[in-house]
């Protein structure tokens, strides 16, 4: 049928479950994810198809659909056998049929790579590309927060400013690659002296700061 052909070829996991957690429909993408055929999955409860902890995790958002009888959009996560986290954006819609248990249709899209890209962009926005320390923007944001906390609770706060002496002479004599390596090594040495709660950043050029 055309409907099955469409549902089996869209880039989403499509499934239907009733309020008793029984699968009424799964498309080919769901079947592949569960490692079984649609024929074997249909008529089974989610706890018979998935590990109980995972099935119970998904069922929490299913319950929201049945309790409210309204569409729910949820971010869901799973962990595979290798410990990798997978993230999904799921849209779950109630389905009421005469003389049948309440049911819902789910559409889930794998956004794992998109989430990783978002986190990487966020990290890059806060990171100095040479030393991989925090950058000036992030440092100033954190310094303001720490200052307000220190002031509110009358706690001491220390700001350390570090500058490499005669750095220009290194740059002039040995060139940018050598001076970059100096900055990288200094950053490593500073990191090795930090406590877990300290914040270290490259403020610019050969300047570093620590809170």
Image: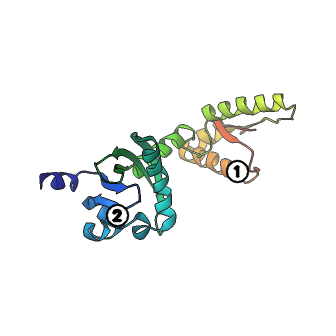
Location of mark 2 (residue): 33
Q: Residue 113: image x %, image y %?
A: 40, 51
* Drawn side of residue 118 relative to residue 166, left or right: left
- Given residues 13 and 52, the one toward you in this image is 52
Q: Residue 66: image x %, image y %?
A: 43, 47
Residue 153 is drawn in which quadrant?
Answer: top right
Q: Which quarter of the rendered picture does the N terminus lie within?
A: bottom left
Crowding near the residue tagged with mark 2, few <14, some 14–19, many ≥20 C-alpha atoms within 10 Å: few
Q: Is residue 93 visible?
A: yes
* Drawn side of residue 195 relative to residue 111, left or right: right
Q: Residue 83: image x %, image y %?
A: 51, 65
Residue at x-position 23% and y-position 51%: 10
- How far apart, in angstroms, are the residues tagged by discs 2 and 1? 42 Å
Residue 144 is drawn in which quadrant?
Answer: top right
Residue at x-position 55% and y-position 43%: 175
Q: Residue 163: image x %, image y %?
A: 72, 37
């Amino acid at each position: 049928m055309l409907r099955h052909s469409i549902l089996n070829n869209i880039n989403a996991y499509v499934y239907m479950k009733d309020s008793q957690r029984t699968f009424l429909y799964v498309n080919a993408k769901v079947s592949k994810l569960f490692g079984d055929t649609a024929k074997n999955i249909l008529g089974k409860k989610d706890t018979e198809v998935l590990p109980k902890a995972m099935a119970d995790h998904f069922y929490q958002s299913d319950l929201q659909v049945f309790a409210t009888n309204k569409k729910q959009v949820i971010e869901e996560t799973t962990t595979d056998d290798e410990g990798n986290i997978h993230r999904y954006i799921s849209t779950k819609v109630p389905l009421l049929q005469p003389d049948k248990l309440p049911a819902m249709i789910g559409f889930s899209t794998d956004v794992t790579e998109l989430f990783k890209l978002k986190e990487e962009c966020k990290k890059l926005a806060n990171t100095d590309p040479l030393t991989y320390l925090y950058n000036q923007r992030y440092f100033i944001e954190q310094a303001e927060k720490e200052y307000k906390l220190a002031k509110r609770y009358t706690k001491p706060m220390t700001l350390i400013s570090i500058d490499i002496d005669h750095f220009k002479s290194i740059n002039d004599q040995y060139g940018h690659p050598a001076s970059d390596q100096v900055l990288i090594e200094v950053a490593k040495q500073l990191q090795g002296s930090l406590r877990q709660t300290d914040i270290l950043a490259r403020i610019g050029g050969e300047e570093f700061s620590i809170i």
